[in-house]
Amino acid sequence: MNKKQVWIFILLIVILCFSFILASLIGGSELKSAKAVYYLFHPGSYGIERDIIWQIRVPRIILGLLVGAGLAACGTVFQGVLRNPLAEPYTLGISGGAAFGVTLGVVLAVSGIYLPFLAFAGSAISMFVVYAIAARKQFSNPTLILGGVMLNFLFSSLVFLIFSVSRAEDVHGVILWLMGDLSSAQNLLIKIIPVFILPSLGLLLVFSRDLNILTLGEEKALHLGVNSEQVKKILFITASCITGACVACSGMIGFVGLVIPHFMRRIVGVDHRVLLPASCIAGAIFLILCDTLARTIIRPLELPVGVITGIFGGIFFLSFLMKSKRWKIF
């Protein structure tokens, strides 16, 4: 890591801390600035403002931090493994399986903490189906992409089938979840999701050097002593587990895993040993700020955060395409 990259990491961490404080102080309910700052730095005190900050906003911010970091990391990994600039966490059918699990749960009147488990179960089923298909073709990139896309179409059709025979209020609840939402942050959920995401992110960092070699092509990776098929399996399963956990807790929040890796690649370079942690921090910042905007732009009502990420992500990506003389990410 060179001096420039060190300063970039310091800047990212400062922005992340600022985003955390900003998101804690502003939201759907207006708080007096002095009291809000006091309660933010005195979590053991008593008061309504303290409850709003530490029981409602902070768990939501932590969830946004974990989901943003997880989705950005998975986008970085999938773009590197598949050598495809359009690859993202939802490319391989994970989101379709999770959506089917949640839709089925809502129709069967399952609620509360059980819905995220159904979403994760659906994403796990989708992951294993794609894995089984790709394993028969030595984990070739076209097989992974096509298998995931087709599985997404299949699950989407099943979701629409359930919509067509369900009550309107059930459909409305599922649609809000499909748009992406962090308002379901619960204390139990905040305790569970790091168990899935943090060790998996650590494992991705361990294989970041192998990912660098893998982006050179499978033949060169073989000559350099990297078992490309085995590394692909590990990265695919790990990133899919992270994606499944993120989708289960927050719904399908788009563009984080697509845009952030592109943006950070232009800032810190293509070395995944640097790019991966930088994307994690940038993804956390992006999602926290987008959720803060979603909570405040039409308060006391709030928008699904997926709407905000879609708007900013779409605008950014279009400008990125127009300014880029050539599409090259490695």
Image: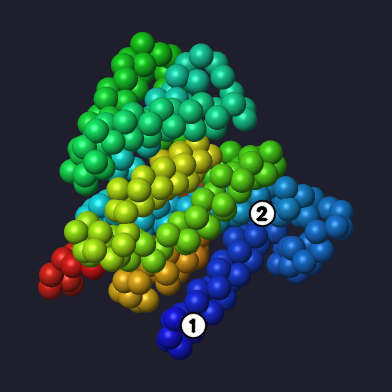
The image shows residue 220, relative to residue 67, as above or below, that is below
Across and down, in percent, residue 86 comes to 23, 53
From the viewer's side, name the closer residue of 241 and 90: 241
Residue shown at 61% from the left, 46% from the top: 195
Residue 6: which numbered mark, if any? 1
Q: Amino acid at mark 2?
A: Val
Across and down, in percent, residue 250 comes to 50, 41
Residue shown at 47% from the left, 66% from the top: 277
The image shows residue 140, relative to residue 116, as above or below, that is below
Count how many numbered circles sit on residues in the image.
Answer: 2
Q: In what quadrant of the picture does the C terminus appear?
A: bottom left
From the viewer's side, name the closer residue of 238 and 300: 238
Residue 195: which numbered mark, if any? none
Around disc 2, counting alpha carbons within 10 Å, would you say few (fewer than 14), some (14 to 19), or many (20 or more)? many
Mark 1 or mark 2, which has the lower sequence index? 1
Residue 58: which numbered mark, if any? 2
What sort of colour scheme is used for the picture? rainbow
The image shows residue 278, relative to residue 159, as above or below, that is below
Secondary structure beneath dot 1 equals: helix
Around disc 1, counting alpha carbons within 10 Å, would you say few (fewer than 14), some (14 to 19), or many (20 or more)? few
**Left or right: 329 as drawn, with respect to 170:** left
Secondary structure beneath dot 2 equals: helix
Measured Cα–Cα span from mark 1 to mark 2: 28 Å
**Left or right: 302 as drawn, with respect to 168:** right
Across and down, in percent, residue 291 comes to 51, 53
Across and down, in percent, residue 59 comes to 65, 49
Q: In what quadrant of the picture does the N terminus appear?
A: bottom left
Residue shown at 29% from the left, 43% from the top: 91
Residue shown at 21% from the left, 44% from the top: 140
From the viewer's side, name the closer residue of 45 and 122: 122
Q: Amino acid at mark 1?
A: Val
